[in-house]
Amino acid sequence: MIETFTYEALPIRVRFGRGAVAEVGAEVARLGARRALVLTTPQQAGEGERIGKLIGENCAGVFPGATMHTPVEVTDKALDALKAADADCVVALGGGSTTGLGKALALRTGVPQLVIPTTYAGSEMTPILGETQEGRKTTIRSLDVLPEAVIYDVDLTLTLPAGLSATSGVNAIAHAVEALYARDRNPVISLMAEDGIRTLSSALPILIHEPANIEARTMALYGAWLCGCCLGAVGMALHHKLCHTLGGTFNLPHAETHTIVLPHAVAYNAPAAPEAMAAITRALGAPDAAQGLFDLVRALGVPRALSDIGMPADGIETAADLAVENPYWNPRPVTRDGIRDLIARAYSGERPVAAVPAEEAA
Ligand code: NAD
């Protein structure tokens, strides 16, 4: 049934398709810019140089220093490079880390951003920026950090390693899952969410074995765009908050943490979000949302236990305390016992269970 809703479209221009990056020069010009600074991680510096050549005389150089968690020290260095090169726009080529650096520069200078995503994280579709200063992460939501234009070129994702393709893809699915039970959900975003889960969950098992399969790569990138739109449009809940806490407290890798926690967070919320669960099961083609997601992760062969990615055993209690410290909206009330149980299962890689804690069952 259609409920009362508010829908606000975000003004981002999107070009999608194989070879679309050839249009990077035209897209820079369309932004009204004349000197584009290309941003990459050190690992993708070579690809950044190639994009710089495609931009041609309007390329102001490459800054290959983007890194995880958008530390302000790196942003300060990039800011110096932006000024030294007299750049009037940024072209961020890479995953969420590089996109984050572009957003941080836009926040400080107002330069327009063209993003060329090479993972499935979805940051390019959101007005959200997380930054770290002296180990503390702060997140802001502002249209000032929303990219103006995005080029999705399937060919640039062919080099994404199989494991990272899988975890980055499940990270994207998590955005769509939480959009389906968001407090501010709406029918347009729910359509995108269900289709995003469907396309990614069919493409990822193929990519694990055939990372260069063009059809699966195209489906996965298209699904990532849909899921990124979900993250940009509506509020997230338990799953994203928990991953933020776990990642920040124990310095766990972003996409892997999302991949491990998602089936457990879905199991926790299942009793309170039946319509969302129905959409997820339709999209996965599985009888149960949480079990279907767990089976997907298992089929992808990526880590299923937080213990495997560096979380210490004595972190379970700490994480449970932190997770209930600052209250936030979630379809099901967040109780310490329930969350402790969830984290303990995710820690040891067990199957998720949708147990109702005693205080709620009573
Ligand atoms: P990432 O950007 O850190 O990339 C991981 C590694 O993969 C890097 O070394 C990168 O150079 C490499 N890589 C990327 N694409 C590649 C390709 N096609 N081929 C070969 N190597 C490639 O990882 P991520 O998961 O995309 O992003 C995670 C970060 O993004 C986190 O800090 C997270 O908080 C942030 N994020 C933010 C938002 C938001 O809306 N603000 C959304 C999602 C993620």
Image (spheres, rainbow, N blue to C red):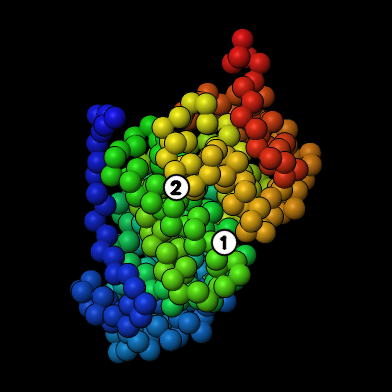
Q: Position of residue 108 (x, y in %)?
A: 36, 60
Residue at left offset 28%, top offset 65%: 14
Q: Residue at x 35, y 80 (%)?
A: 19
Q: Nearer the viewer, residue 300 or 73?
A: 300
Quarter residue 122 falls in: bottom left
Residue hosting label 1? 205
Write the residue at 66% across / 16% down.
Answer: 358
Locate residue 236, reporting x and y percent: 44, 40
Horizontal side of residue 312 vs 56, given as left or right:
right
Q: Quadrant of the N terminus?
A: top left
Q: Amino acid at mark 1?
A: Pro
Crowding at mark 1 (Cα within 10 Å: few <14, some 14-19, many 20+)? many
Q: Quadrant of residue 48?
A: bottom left
Q: Is residue 154 visible?
A: yes
Left of 124 or right of it: where is 335?
A: right
Label 2 to label 1, Cα distance in Å?
Answer: 15 Å
Q: Which residue of the protein is positioned furthest toward the top in this rendering? A: 362
Task: Looking at the image, tell me whether mark 2 or mark 1 is earlier in sequence order.
Answer: 1
The residue labelled by disc 2 is 283
Q: How many marks?
A: 2
Mark 2 is surrounded, within 10 Å at the Cα level, by few (under 14), some (14 to 19) or many (20 or more) other residues, namely many
Q: Nearer the viewer, residue 93 or 82?
A: 93
Residue furthest out toward the right: 313
Residue 160, percent from left and from top: 54, 72
Q: Amino acid at mark 2?
A: Ala
- Which residue is at 33% across, 77% downward? 20
Q: Is residue 151 visible?
A: no
Q: Secondary structure at mark 1?
A: helix
Depth check: 198 or 256 in front? 198
Question: Where is the C terminus found, in terms of image quarters?
Answer: top right
Mark 2 touches mark 1? (CB < 8 Å)? no
Above or below residue 2? Residue 201 is: below
